[in-house]
Image (cartoon, rainbow, N blue to C red):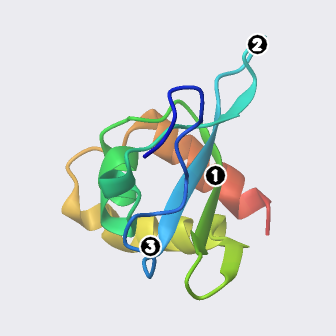
């Protein structure tokens, strides 16, 4: 059992799953922050849905990791490419996603 003064682990309960975290840009004094995510909501499909429903201000970087397999990597371009493939599924593309796609293109 976790003591009250301990931070919760970021290691997923289901150890062999890919976990996605977003570095979000709030601008100004707040700057870039890694966004908190529920353990159950740190998967790829939830990430795509959250991006398309403007749950992030201005995603700057997306990182995935899998502790059971022992890897982590920047998946910003992978997610941007997947969003581009899926754009036809959506009536409108949020401004935050448009900016993310533009910045991801410029990063290559």
Say whether residue 7 is left or right of residue 60.
left
Q: In this orientation, which residue lies closer to the viewer: 76 or 107?
A: 76
Marks 3/1: CA distance? Answer: 14 Å
**Residue at left 58%, top 42%?**
99
Vertical comparison of 3 with 29: above or below: below
Q: Secondary structure at mark 1?
A: helix
**Residue at left 78%, top 11%?**
29
Foreground mark, 3 or 1?
3
Query: Outermost residue toward the top?
Result: 29
Residue that numbered label 3 is attached to: 82
Say whether residue 40 is left or right of residue 108.
left
Marks 2/1: CA distance? Answer: 20 Å
Say whether residue 102 is left or right of residue 8.
right
Q: Looking at the figure, which quarter contains the C terminus?
A: bottom right
Q: x, y (%) of residue 41? A: 33, 53
Q: x, y (%) of residue 5? A: 59, 26
Residue that numbered label 2 is attached to: 28
Vertical comparison of 36 with 62: above or below: above
Q: Around disc 3, counting alpha carbons within 10 Å, would you say few (fewer than 14), some (14 to 19), or many (20 or more)?
A: few
Foreground mark, 2 or 1?
2
**Residue at left 49%, top 66%?**
19
């Amino acid at each position: 059992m976790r003591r009250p003064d301990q931070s919760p682990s970021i290691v997923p309960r289901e150890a062999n799953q890919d976990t996605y975290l977003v570095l979000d840009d709030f601008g100004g004094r707040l700057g870039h922050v890694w966004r908190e995510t529920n353990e159950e909501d740190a998967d790829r499909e939830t990430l795509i849905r959250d991006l398309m429903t403007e749950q992030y201000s201005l995603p700057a970087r997306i990182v995935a990791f899998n502790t059971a397999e022992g890897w982590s990597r920047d998946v910003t371009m992978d997610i941007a490419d997947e969003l581009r493939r899926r754009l036809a599924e959506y009536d409108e593309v949020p401004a935050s996603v448009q900016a993310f796609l533009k910045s991801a293109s410029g990063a290559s």
